[in-house]
Image (tube, helix red, strand yellow):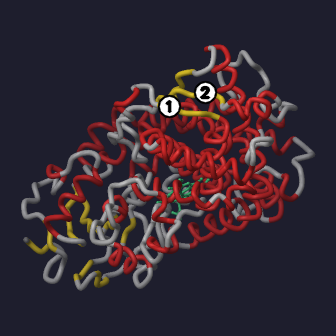
Amino acid sequence: RRRRHGKGGPPGPPLALPVLGHLHLLEKPLHHSLARLAARYGPVFSLRLGSRDAVVVSSADLARECFTEHDVTFANRPHFPTMALMTYGGKTIGNCAYGPHWRHLRRVATVHLLSARRVSSSMLPTITAELRAMVRRLHRAAAVAGGGVRIELRQRLFELSLSALMETIAQTKMWRGTAVVDDDDAATDMSPETQEFKESLDLLIQFFVAANTWDLLPMLRWLHVLGVKNKIAAAVATRDAFFQRLIERHRLKDDVGEGDKMSMLGVLLSLQKSEPDKYSDDIIMALCFSMFSAGTETTAGATEWAMSLLLNHPEVMKKAQAEIDASVGTSRLLDADDVPRLGYLQGIISETLRLYPVVPLLVPHESTVDCTLGGHHIPSGTMLLVNTYAIHRDPTVWADPTAFRPERFSAADAEGLLLMPFGMGRRRCPGETLALRMLGLVLGTLIQCFDWDTVGGAAGVDMAQGVGLTLPRAVPLEAMCKPRQVMLDVIRKL
Ligand code: HEM
């Protein structure tokens, strides 16, 4: 074991190559590789990632230490030049440096956009309308197929998350005079605006994945980015022209609703009226993009993993269905207010996020001053990666850690154990309340309305993990979907 970071630094692998550092030791998915290195070098170890010094934390105790005792020290984010091209110069909430700009955006997000009150009174009704449109569409597809139908869930869940966020941010459907796209022949429930935005988001997500490597290897960045920089600039220009059009349309409209009925853009533009300097159009766009980039793939991915686990554990699916039938009944659809009462459903969500935390290494943090972590010296400017995937599967903490057992959250067993799919401390996810309510609503409704089965019969669902920003499945989830007989009357009336 060689100590990096000078005397007193954490252990780490010895062979750091010029330019690459330890990148040659890493394979994708990165959290697996880092978990293997942790087994060798311990719960805090150091790495040279291309041009950056990093420490990797893989135990609950050290993660707690990072985000309690050293929370301010690690509240910064590393500056990634390629990423900055897509994030308004590193000015979105998730990417920006710790300081006054971050504090301003974070306050706007938590107080004005994502507060528990706004989530309940404004966002959940919008999300419910989108979800019901999806249920109608699944029912129609099943009826055409004569009972049960094969469904590709990943795409549908992504579109649902994107549409739900677009409608809470900009109410594009309401502006067209209807709360939902009510066209049986349309290929999607997304509004034309959401479809347009999806194209530029799909492209940007690809660049985000590639930027991870470019930003660690400055040499590659110059070789590659010179080729794609124009493409990134074009995608960014398309995205911003789209946001600008949404802003202008909101400005022209007299009636953007009041209080909780206002869209996020409506709220931001009314703040702009009273304090134009603090709420420029650029800041509004950075806030909107913060929501879309952080809130879409995450919630869709977590729902996809939950459905995969349920398909492989039909007994858990049945138990969840029984809980919903007993608590909500079969004469109406589950709604957002039912979710807090459904303890078993919430156990399923916690257990899914434990096994498949969709942001497995959190977003990289960076230290601003020297500190001591787990007894090791960490210099300022060190990148911190916290491996929640490894922490959530630590056999010294969790009994039978790879088993899917939602019951562990109904017993006192899980009390005091650190589950941190949303991070911890001041950079913790501000969308947690929205995400959890949305996950409960979507998953609960899919379980209440339909019987689900695997497409491959006894072989079950392949749980292999792929490569991407948010712990994707290696292959998109497909499933057989059949409306439940006892719910048909309710579904037909939607
Ligand atoms: C299952 C769903 C979600 C999961 C698991 C999740 C998880 C996370 C994690 C792990 C972080 C980084 C924390 C850190 O660096 O320490 C984060 C940051 C963030 N999330 Fe989420 N998230 C989810 C959904 C959402 C939603 C729905 C929104 C908003 C619409 C959102 C907005 C954000 C923002 C703005 C940040 C950056 C916070 C900052 O740097 O100050 N997230 N999220």
- Determine whether the residue tagged by mark 1 lies in a helix, strand or loop: strand
Q: Is residue 223 above or below residue 432?
A: above
Q: Is residue 493 above or below residue 264?
A: above
Residue at position x 43%, y 32% in the image: 476
Q: Give the residue pinned by disc 2.
A: 482
Disc marking residue 453: 1
Residue at position x 68%, y 42% in the image: 164
Q: Nearer the viewer, residue 245 or 195?
A: 195
Image coordinates of residue 136 in percent, x first then y, are 72, 28
Residue at position x 62%, y 19% in the image: 147
Q: Write down the quadrant of residue 142 in the picture.
A: top right
Quadrant that contains the C terminus: top right
Query: Are the residues at dot 2 and dot 1 in contact (C-beta closer than 8 Å)?
Result: yes
Residue at position x 74%, y 29% in the image: 488
Few, some or many residues within 10 Å of mark 1 (<14, 14–19, 20+): many
Q: CA distance from mark 2 to mark 1?
A: 9 Å
- Determine whether the residue tagged by mark 2 lies in a helix, strand or loop: strand
Image coordinates of residue 87 in percent, x first then y, are 51, 50
Task: Find out if the beta carbon at label 1 lies less than 8 Å from the nearest ligand 1 atom.
Answer: no
Q: Is residue 413 above or below residue 238?
A: below
From this viewpoint, is residue 86 visible?
A: no
From this viewpoint, is residue 419 visible?
A: yes
Image coordinates of residue 61 in percent, x first then y, are 34, 78
Few, some or many residues within 10 Å of mark 2 (<14, 14–19, 20+): many
Q: Is residue 33 left or right of residue 330?
A: left
Q: Is residue 214 left or right of residue 300?
A: left
Mark 2 vs mark 1: which is more N-terminal? 1
Q: Nearer the viewer, residue 256 or 317?
A: 317
Q: Amino acid at mark 1?
A: Asp
Q: Amino acid at mark 2?
A: Lys
Quadrant that contains the N terminus: bottom left
